[in-house]
Structures are given as structure tokens and as C-alpha cells.
Image (spheres, grey):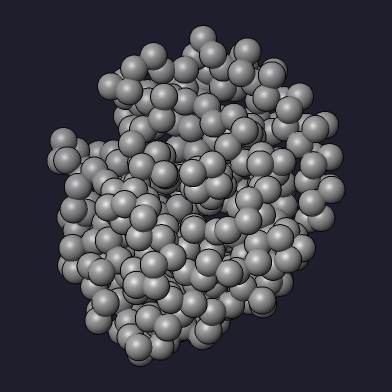
Amino acid sequence: MRPKGYHYLKILKNHLGSLDKVFNGELIYPRQMELHLPANHKIPCNFHCSWCQGRKLNKGLGRWEVKALKLLAKIGHKIPYYTLGGQYTEALLNPYSMAFLSLATSKGANVGIHTNGSMLKELEDSIGWLTEYFNISKDQNDYLSVSLDAGTTESHKKGKNLTKDWFSEIMEGLRMAVKIRGDRKKSTIRIAYLLNEYNSSLKEIKTMIKLAKDIGVDSLRFSIPYDYYGEDFEDVKCYRNTYETVKNKEYEEMLKPLMSKSLDEKPYIFYFPPFYQDVNEMNFKQCIYSYYQISFGADGYVYKCSSSASPTFKGHRLGKITDNVDEFNKMVIANQNKDWDVVKNCWGKNVRCSRMGLEINRAWRDK
């Protein structure tokens, strides 16, 4: 059972009204725009996670925030959802993060945030960032997702290659977020937990579940790390066969008694098996993920999707980030191209689908 925010195909159908609109030549804004904010313009991220999907990619950082804000002010709610994330960047290091969130919500859009959580406490203490975020949040369709990936300080340090105890600070930031939100029907607060060699003991998992319940977050999601973006497909298949498939059996058996039995439980605790990112399922001929999402890469270019938003994949660029609506509209239309050669331009360039993209494209293939 998945929370409603994770039913990607259903979300796309609701956005379009009907899949019959796909490739009909009409300008259709995607369901969401993912903004890979360029951190503090000096470093992409303050963590060094061993399993970061963008670990091996070129990590360009541009200065394009003002242009993007001007564009968003013009197109407004035509795109109903904006997410702050990053293929290789930490969004909350960026000084414009709240500007994007407040502008989007003022236009009637929903917002999502993907962060390592390191800045939550500091931002609240210094400028009241969390207080402002929960004030502008529209409803529970907004979310704040923290990639915690550990249940103890020790495993957090090892997995993310850190010397400082960031784990305690992140947990305090989460406590502050839950307290500030209070009983208001505002943004959901999520914890993401990638299982790895440092954090997957039964003892630590139980510790994390207890912490999530004590803090009062809305959900706790377990999953297995995706292989690095840009890896040769044969290497990804090897990783799938020797690691994902083997570990999935182990984790499913261990986690099953600990998972939530009802969607009404809080926190809702669930596990995403690697089936939802299976490279062997990437065998379709067309991509319709462009109707779900378009991405602004940290380097200052508009990309087809979040999976390819790096200078490593220049062939997936649609153009430079602009404040001109007509120019942006042309990029949206170009992205919704039924003749885009997935085999040549994606598989042939070692570009793989995200979990969302795979689920949507697999359904389109079967349809």
C-alpha cells in the first residue's frame, strides 16, 4: 500500500484528464517542475553520500534563480506542482529556496522539498524558515522529505562520509518542523531511508521506527539505493542481479512485521522494493514522462527529466533557463516528442528512468 502521493500514474491521469491527450500536438504543461537549485554556488552539497545517484556525473552550478523566478511569476499555476530537489545538489543551501516556495504557493501551486535535512534547524534559528514554510503551505499535498538514511549518528557519518554529528541536528530540525506545523492541515513531513551496509541491522531499523513515531512524522519509507546515474546498463544489470535482488529478499523478510497495516497509521511505514526501478523493465519505445515533469538543472539548463539533469547528458537539454514564456513553451512542446528515440538517446547514453518515470512509461507501453 502506497500513500496517494506515490501513485504516479494516477497522478498523471488526473493531471491530463485522459491519456488520449498524449502526443496530440497540444501545448500541455507538465504536472510538475523540478528545480535543482545550485546549492550555495560554491559546492553542490555539504554531504558526500556513498550512494548519491549523481556521484559520478559532472556537477555544473549556474546562477539562474532570478530568471526562473520571473518565469514562474508569469506561468503561475499552469504547472500545479513545484519540487525543490537535486540530482547532485542540496536545495536548502540555496539562498533563493524560500523565494521559490512562496512564489509557487502564492500562485496556487503545491510544493515539495527533497533535502538531506542538515539546514532545517539552522534556517529556522536564523530566519524562521520552517515557520514561514508552514505558514505558506497550502495543504497536505505539500511535503517536506528528508533523506535521513540512518538510525544512529555512527551509521549516518559512515554512509554520508561525514566527520560532524549531523544526525542529531537533523533530528532536532525534524522535531522543530513537527512542532511548528502543529495540528494544522499543512505539508506532510516524510523521512526517506535508503538501506545499506551501515544502517540495515534489525536493531537500528527498530530504533529509527521508534524515533519516527516519537517525533510524529507522517511517513517513513525504506528502499534500496538505486545504482549511480550514467553507469553502463550492463553494470546496472549486474548490480540488480547481485545486490538489489538478493538484498530485497532479505529486507522484505525482515521489514514485513514492522510495516504499517493501514494507510491511516502515523507514521505510515512502508518499503519500496527495487521492482519499481528495475532496469530490465526499461524496454519501451516512447517516453511520456515529459507530461509528468520537466527539470531545471543546477547548471542553468532545462532538461527532459530529473534523471538526465546534468552536463553529462547535454543531449537531453531543451535550452537555457529563461524568463521568456514563449521560449519556455517551445521547450515544453519539444519535450513532448513522440519521435524521441529512447533506445538511442536514453539507453544508449546510459540515462535511466527514475522510479516515477519507469512506472508511467511502463503503463504507457502496456497500454
Going by the picture, which residue comes out furthest to the left? 184
Q: Residue at x 64, y 20 (%)?
A: 251
334 relative position to 248: left or right: left
Q: Is residue 307 above or below residue 196?
A: below
Q: Residue at x 49, y 44 (%)?
A: 367
Q: Position of residue 100 (x, y in %)?
A: 32, 70
Q: Position of residue 242 (x, y in %)?
A: 82, 31
Q: Is residue 30 above or below residue 194?
A: below
Q: Residue at x 54, y 41 (%)?
A: 366
Q: How many marks?
A: 0
Closer to the camera in the image, 91 or 324: 324
Q: Does the rendering let one see residue 287?
A: yes
208 relative position to 330: left or right: right
Q: Position of residue 309 (x, y in %)?
A: 59, 68
180 relative position to 71: left or right: left
Going by the picture, which residue comes out furthest to the top? 257
Closer to the camera in the image, 156 or 11: 11
Q: Position of residue 188 (x, y in %)?
A: 30, 41
Q: Is residue 86 above or below residue 181?
A: below
224 relative position to 193: left or right: right
Closer to the camera in the image, 242 or 221: 242
